[in-house]
Amino acid sequence: MKLWIIIAILITPWYWSLSVPKNLFETDLKNDIKEAHMTAEWERGKIPNSFTNPFFSNWLGKLVNRRLSIVMENLDIGNYFFSGHPRERVGVEEKQKFFFFQFLLLLVGLTNPHLRKYARFLMIYSLIALAAVFVFKWRSFEQTLPLSIPFIVVMALGLEQIFQRLKR
Amino acid sequence: MKKKFNTPALLAIVLLGGIIRFYHLGNVGIGFFRDEAAMGFNSWSILKTGADEFGRFLPLFFRSFEVFFMPAYEYLSVPFFMLFGPTEFSARFLSAFSGTLLIFVGFLISKELFKSERIGLLTALIVSLAPWSIFYSKGAFEGNLGLLFFSFAFYLWIRFINTENNKLFFLSLFFFVLSMYSYQAPRFVAPVFVVFSILLSGNWSKKIKLWFLGGLFALLLYLPILVFTLSPAGYHRAVGVSIFSGRSPRLTFKEALSLYLHYYSPGNLFGQGDYNPQRRVPNYSVFYLWMLPLFLIGGAKLLQTDSKTKKTLLLWLLVSPIPAALTRDPFHTYRAILIFLPISILIAIGFSQFIGYFKKNRVIIVLAVFSVIAFSTASFLFSFFKVAPVISWRDWDYGYREVAEFIRDQPANLRIVIDDPNTESYIHFLFYGLIPIEDYQKAASAVVSGQYYTSADELRPQKVGRFEFRKVDWPSERGDKNTIFVFPSNRLYPSEFTNDPKLTLVKTVYSPGGEPAFYLVRSAN
């Protein structure tokens, strides 16, 4: 499995031209709270006054929603395998993270019976990585690299599956 | 779940869904979009004159702007216009009604698929409260009617598979064809679904005669539309938005696959939502975020389920985003509306599993879950009724009703010029009754003449009576006498008319957020 993991890493463009991110664990919560306050205030200034406004339009909600939207952005499959389209047309910059054929490797990896062995690790790691995305707002090509690990593991399983079939 | 509570629970869920859908239906505060006005006006016109805006007697497609709408929504809305008159409520009634009935149909489908009333009730609950279902039920969306017919056809289809009653087969085909008369997407999805469902059934070769008769029956029902398939009326919409124009096959395949996968992407389904602000409620996608884990659990459970009809649900899930994936827009929630019911069913399966995990303290867990549901629904409705109008009013053509009401009270000898480069705003003035139907029909039929179905060009009059719909050349026209110019606020700066003694700002229509939406400027006599 180690060999397949190394191969999966080597064929991944995400790892090729990588500069080490300096802002991986930086977060400016104070500024974020200030911005969330401003957004909520703007919204409340526009909508009709009601006793429900503080419940549904408040800084905490805005703060959480902003961060959740970044988490959700990282859950988009297009972010990883389909750089350049179609979201670039609507202003979302995307860079090639994996090759398209690696998507097929991923699908094959999901059918590997050994996946069960790694399921717990994949789940816990993914949750921790997504929690980090939530806290540190990882969006850029460099920052989101830790999210590649589960993909690499499943792709390695895909490679293993394919080569076992070929051996037979 | 105790069986004696199931019927009242279902009634309560449908009632709740109905109340949410019909509450403030005629005035949701965000505006009244031109497509809604077009479908609504054509229903009213059919009721009053038997013909559409072009004076075309009982058309098979409804032509408005350069769009050809499928006919079911317009014809089936006629009774509501008869009851409630030419109002926004009438135009949206059928969509809201379809959305309410869909809750019940969702229950029937899940109950039939999984033989579980609990999953049925949870499906009804999810459909009743899901953002996609509420959103598309609160506007005049023909796709919502198409989804209802398609879903009911699917229910009859799985009943047919389970009972082998041939009557259900023909009835199912009837509703599949009705869905094809309602919206563009089922024109592709319904036949593909039926053919593959038959092929996947395993024993398809034993019933060749039945399939042949069914095919003939469906073909006969669909024939009126089919004969126009090769004319612009039949294909213009599909070609106009497709990804195939002028691209290499390799790129097109990759893009189509990318677009297709967008419809299963958790980021889109539970987070970001539609890319077009007109089809998006701020901070919400088509499902609530808390539904994401239930979706994953439900998907895993479905794959483990051993049932005859499981394949049909998967087929529905896999086929329904194809038409949307072959168009250019990423995650177009309206074109992919057919996918949201099977996803809702997956969420309901996951929900049922989730409740099943807790053997102890189930009441507390259920109460906690329902508190989350209540809060998220209330929060969505808040965003829909209060925040969306502030943000998306321009995308929803807000303000034309107010403009029309003002102009109605003005002297009838005034010339009215609406600054509109797209020339599509005419439909609002027709809908609000400012232009007599017969006058417009006369002018429009002269322009379109024999090309109603055969040309997708812009064929409509820019002037009808005292109304003109076109781009205004302000420097040369500002001196025109006895005229009211209607400007969207993003088309003219106030400084262009404030200091001119020959011009008077007679009305400013404000958006829900308090910004100017329209300026109505009157020139001197």
Image: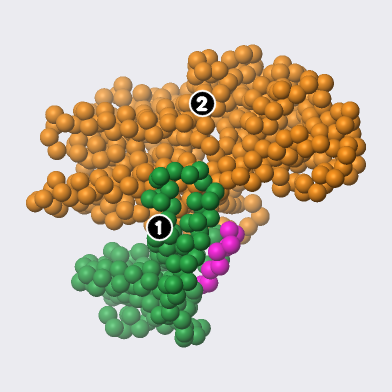
Q: Quadrant of the N terminus of chain B?
A: top left
Tell which of B91 and B481 is nearer to you. B481
The answer to whether A146 is drawn above or below residue B227 in the figure is: below
Identify the image quadrant of residue A116.
bottom left
The chain ID associated with circle 2 is B
Question: Is B246 situated left or right of B486 in this image?
Answer: left
Which numbered marker is on residue A61?
1
Place of residue B426 in the rendered image (x, y in percent of width and height, measured from the top left): 71, 30
Which residue does the image show at 41% across and 42% down from the upper left? B381
Which color was chain B given? orange
Tell which of A165 and B458 is nearer to you. B458
Tell which of B148 and B396 is nearer to you. B396
The chain ID associated with circle 1 is A
Which color was chain A given? green
The answer to whether B2 is drawn above or below residue B411 in the figure is: below
Q: Which residues are magenta?
A: A88-98
Q: Which residue is mark 2?
A: B89
Place of residue B395 in the rendered image (x, y in percent of width and height, measured from the top left): 60, 44
Identify the image quadrant of residue A164.
bottom left
Place of residue B84 in the rendered image (x, y in percent of width and height, measured from the top left): 51, 18
Q: How is the image coloured?
A: by chain
Q: Quadrant of the C terminus of chain B?
A: top right
Question: Is B455 situated left or right of B353 in this image?
Answer: right
Label 2: few (<14), some or many (≥20) within 10 Å?
A: many
